[in-house]
């Protein structure tokens, strides 16, 4: 379990996501942020929809069969996605082609902008991902009599709301720049999460508002 769903799935996502997120920027120029937002929003919808049905599958057919079915669906959809990817046409003779990208460019290790972004993302994702992982556990412990279905419901709510937010953030990025949009999104997320969690997350309605 730790090796397959933890290590191997983590490695797979880590290898796939940078490529998936980078593809739209190669094809779009004016609306690059919105295009990237739609692509990233797909991962939110992909997390929200299964969350609505996985619990019912777990109750009816068990963990192993549920995981096998879920893995098969992921494999099929990823294969279809790979088949639909088109290679960007090569640059024309009058345009200088981009330089070859190295697998590991050492110059980034001495770039303060790189380390600034790395540090910001490192700490921001701690706060961003924790609710997705622990919200159902928190709901069950806070409201002991609640059903499993209702305890898990905040997860798809957060996922669908995240999809809308990612598209909106992409639109804002096209208007004010990617770095400015990043700063605004992180600031709003941090403040709202701090306020809502301490004020509203004492009842089920409050937990849903937070989600």
Image: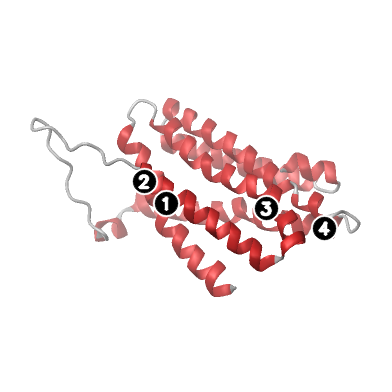
Query: Along the line of sight, which residue is nearer the eye, 70 or 188?
Result: 70
User: Tags 4 and 3 in contact by the CB under 8 Å rule?
Assistant: no
Which label is found at residue 131?
3
**Mark 1 and mark 3: Cα distance apart in space:** 30 Å
The residue depicted at 43 percent of the width and 38 percent of the height is 179
- The location of residue 112, given as percent across then percent down, is 35, 52
Residue at which label 4 appears: 140
At horizontal 86% and vertical 46% (from top left) the residue drawn is 203
**Mark 2 packing: few (<14 Cα in 10 Å), some, or many (20+)?**
few
Judge depth for marks 3 and 2 and give the one in front: 2
Q: Earlier in the sequence, mark 4 or mark 3?
A: 3
Q: Earlier in the sequence, mark 4 or mark 1?
A: 1
Relative to the observer, which residue lies in front, 50 or 133?
A: 50
Q: Nearer the viewer, mark 4 or mark 1?
A: 1
Residues marked 2 and 4 touching at CB (< 8 Å): no
Q: Which mark is residue 79?
A: 1
Cα–Cα gap, marks 4 and 3 = 13 Å
Q: Residues within 10 Å of mark 1 (few under 14, many from 20)?
A: few
Question: Which one is closest to the eye, mark 4 or mark 3?
Answer: 4
Q: Which residue is mark 2?
A: 83
Sequence-earlier tag: 1 or 3: 1
């Amino acid at each position: 379990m730790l090796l397959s769903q933890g290590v191997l799935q983590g490695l797979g996502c880590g290898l796939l996501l940078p490529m998936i997120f980078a593809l739209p920027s190669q094809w779009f120029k004016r609306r690059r942020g919105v295009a990237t937002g739609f692509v990233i929003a797909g991962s939110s919808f992909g997390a929200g929809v299964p969350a609505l049905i996985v619990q019912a599958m777990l109750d009816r057919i068990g963990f192993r069969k549920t995981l096998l079915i879920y893995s098969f669906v992921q494999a099929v959809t990823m294969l279809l996605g790979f088949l639909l990817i088109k290679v960007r046409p090569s640059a024309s003779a009058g345009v200088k082609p981009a330089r070859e990208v190295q697998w590991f460019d050492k110059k980034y290790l001495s770039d303060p902008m790189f380390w600034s972004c790395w540090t910001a993302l490192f700490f921001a994702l701690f706060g961003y991902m924790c609710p997705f992982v622990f919200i159902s556990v928190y709901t069950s412990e806070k409201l002991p009599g609640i059903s499993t279905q209702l305890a898990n419901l905040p997860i798809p709510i957060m996922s669908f709301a995240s999809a809308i937010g990612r598209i909106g953030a992409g639109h804002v990025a096209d208007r004010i720049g990617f770095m400015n949009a990043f700063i605004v999104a992180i600031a709003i997320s941090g403040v709202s999460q701090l306020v809502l969690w301490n004020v509203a997350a004492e009842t089920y309605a409050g937990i849903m508002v937070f989600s």
